[in-house]
Image (cartoon, rainbow, N blue to C red):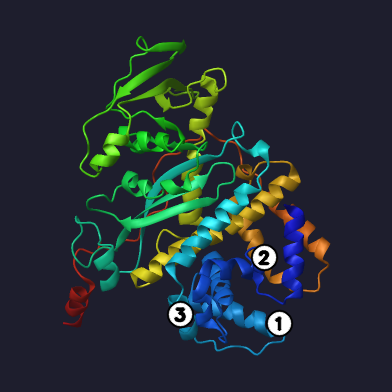
Amino acid sequence: MLGSFRAAVAKARRDRSLLFAALLSEESILEAFGPARWLWQGWVYTPAATVWTFLSQCLSMDHSCRDAVARLIAWRVARGFRPCSADTGAYCTARDALPEAACHQLVCRTGSDLERDAPQEWLWHKRHVRVVDGSTITMPDTAANQAEYPQMASQKPGCGFPIARIVVVFSLALGTALEAALGRYEGKQTGENSMFRTLHDCLAPGDVALFDRYFSGWFDLALLLARGVDVVVRKHQLRDTDFRKGQRLGTDDHLVCWCKPQRPKWMSRETYAAIPHELGLREVRVRVTQKGFRTNELVVVTSLLDAEQYPADEIAELYRRRWQAELNLRSLKTVLQMDHLRCKTPHRVRNEFFMHLVAYNLIRRVMALAAQDAGTRPWQLSFKGALQTVNAFLPMLCSDAPLDAWCTAFVAALATHIVGDRPDRYEPRVKQRRAKEYDLMNKPRADYKRQMAK
């Protein structure tokens, strides 16, 4: 893996390519774009240049188009090319022309290609575990965004931001985003479990799906099992558990049978008839002990029925690692500042969402390189530390620094930032810093301005 990265850096230097060519090659971009790549022939903003500039915008702390174009001009001057215009209009036009399907394809490829090369010791029982979770993001308050992703119904018109729901499928071993969906926050079939059903194709037979109890519905489990995908999920609080019943496998560990409920409205009759009449599952009680607190108990449901091959304590430990999905979403929304996107039309918003995921996967790639070289695990490295290192080192990619020295220092700096193993860490959900003493907006901004004008 490290050798291929050195070769990519060397090729980027020889081809005088932009900064991100060492992490995402031009060939990969053109392959994802297909016939649409011919639309940019002869422009400064070719498909590769547009994507690379977009990625630099997603990874910068400024996040502005002006900063992204300034980086492109600096690179062109450093490589002896004529500087392009500092006006952001041409860049925004090229970015608007990016096909959503191509941006989506780049997310899937950058995530799956990395996991395919992952060492076996990073996997769980030599199986790929997919951890699923959802969240929300907001965007600028424009008429186009409000029409596609309306603000919350409880907010007055003009007082809130358009809001969208997102669901992301992560690799547990590497943390990469393998697939994602973005949709409306409210309305029929807009819940996280409904959106996840549209992403089932990214799961292969033999995979293990890991998620919280929001996805633990009978039909959600049945559809995954029909694909040959095993599940590990927390039992829903409305379903009773009695460890005195069923086939006992050990203390607080037994096999149960869940009978098929009535057909839901969203499911077709053909699909309902193809699903078996009952599911054979395993329930394991997990006890989380923490000094100074009461013991917390929860029940985990899984289709991994072999207690010898998959002991109860390993099932419990695997479910506790589901928290990695929360940390991955934090890296996306807080570190990469994806919690509030900046584009003013739905098409650009979706592209911005997908390009943030591509940038996130590229950071995860260099973290995997550093972890393999240092003999550690990718989830033990700091994502924010990796982002800071990438932003510091990539401008030196086209310098005259020796290649081996650059790669060695880059990987060593990444491996230095180890995060603590804090599975039971807890913090109060309060703010120490006081908010500004301004009133909350409770009517449209135009009304305030008319009032001030009087």
Residue 341 is labelled as none
Crowd rating for badge 3 (residues with CA inside 10 Å; few <14, some 14–19, many 20+): some
> Circle 2 — which element?
helix
Residue 5 image offset from top left, x and y in percent: 72, 59
Give the residue displayed 44% in from the left and 71% down from the top: 99
Label 1 belongs to which residue? 78
Which is in the foreground here, disc 3 or disc 2? 3
Seen in the picture, residue 364 relative to 318 is either above or below; the reply is below
Give the residue displayed 38% in from the left and 22% down from the top: 280
Seen in the picture, residue 169 relative to 314 is either above or below; the reply is below
Label 2 belongs to which residue? 392
Crowd rating for badge 1 (residues with CA inside 10 Å; few <14, some 14–19, many 20+): few
> Horizontally, is 84 left or right of 409 in the view?
left
CA–CA distance in space, label 3 to label 2? 25 Å
Seen in the picture, residue 57 relative to 231 is either above or below; the reply is below
CA–CA distance in space, label 3 to label 1? 23 Å
Q: Nearer the viewer, residue 111 or 219?
A: 219
Q: Earlier in the sequence, mark 3 or mark 1?
A: 1
| Type of the residue with mark 2 | Ala
> Horizontally, is 138 left or right of 304 in the view?
left
> Circle 1 — which element?
helix
Label 3 belongs to which residue? 92
